[in-house]
Amino acid sequence: MLVPRSHPALRRQPVPGSVRWFVLSDALKLALAVVLVDRGVVQAAVRYSLMSPAQVV
């Protein structure tokens, strides 16, 4: 049986740019979330340390 050259199984395609971009944007979103959470934690710690003991209790 002859398989036509255009058969999908015979064409090795590199990863499409859109898929690569999707993975990259996912990684960027994760990094951004980590940075934002980190900043939130730092701000909360600073706020907590600036409060007087009377406010904390």
Image (cartoon, grey):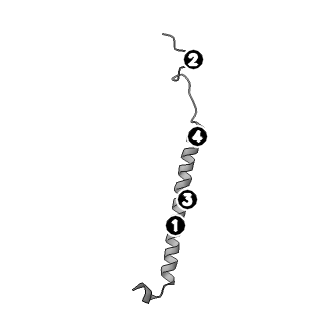
Mark 3–mark 1 Cα distance, whole angstroms, equals 10 Å
- The residue under the point 58% across, 40% down is 18
Looking at the image, is mark 1 or mark 2 earlier in the sequence?
Answer: 2
Q: Which structural element holds mark 1? A: helix
Looking at the image, is mark 2 or mark 4 earlier in the sequence?
Answer: 2
Disc number at residue 38? 1
Mark 4–mark 1 Cα distance, whole angstroms, equals 30 Å
Residue 56: where, in percent of width, then height? 42, 84
Disc number at residue 18? 4
Q: Residues within 10 Å of mark 4 (few under 14, many from 20)?
A: few
Q: Can you name the residue that lies furthest to the left here?
A: 57
Cβ atoms at labels 1 and 2 below 8 Å apart: no
In the rendered image of this protein, does residue 16 appear above or below residue 33?
Answer: above
- The residue under the point 51% across, 61% down is 34
Three-letter amino acid code of the residue under disc 4:
Ser
Three-letter amino acid code of the residue under disc 2:
Arg
Which residue was labeled with disc 2? Answer: 5
Q: Which structural element holds mark 3? A: helix
Three-letter amino acid code of the residue under disc 1:
Asp
Looking at the image, is mark 3 or mark 4 earlier in the sequence?
Answer: 4
Q: How many marks?
A: 4
Q: Which structural element holds mark 4? A: helix
In the rendered image of this protein, does residue 4 appear above or below residue 46?
Answer: above
Which residue was labeled with disc 3? Answer: 32
Mark 3–mark 4 Cα distance, whole angstroms, equals 20 Å
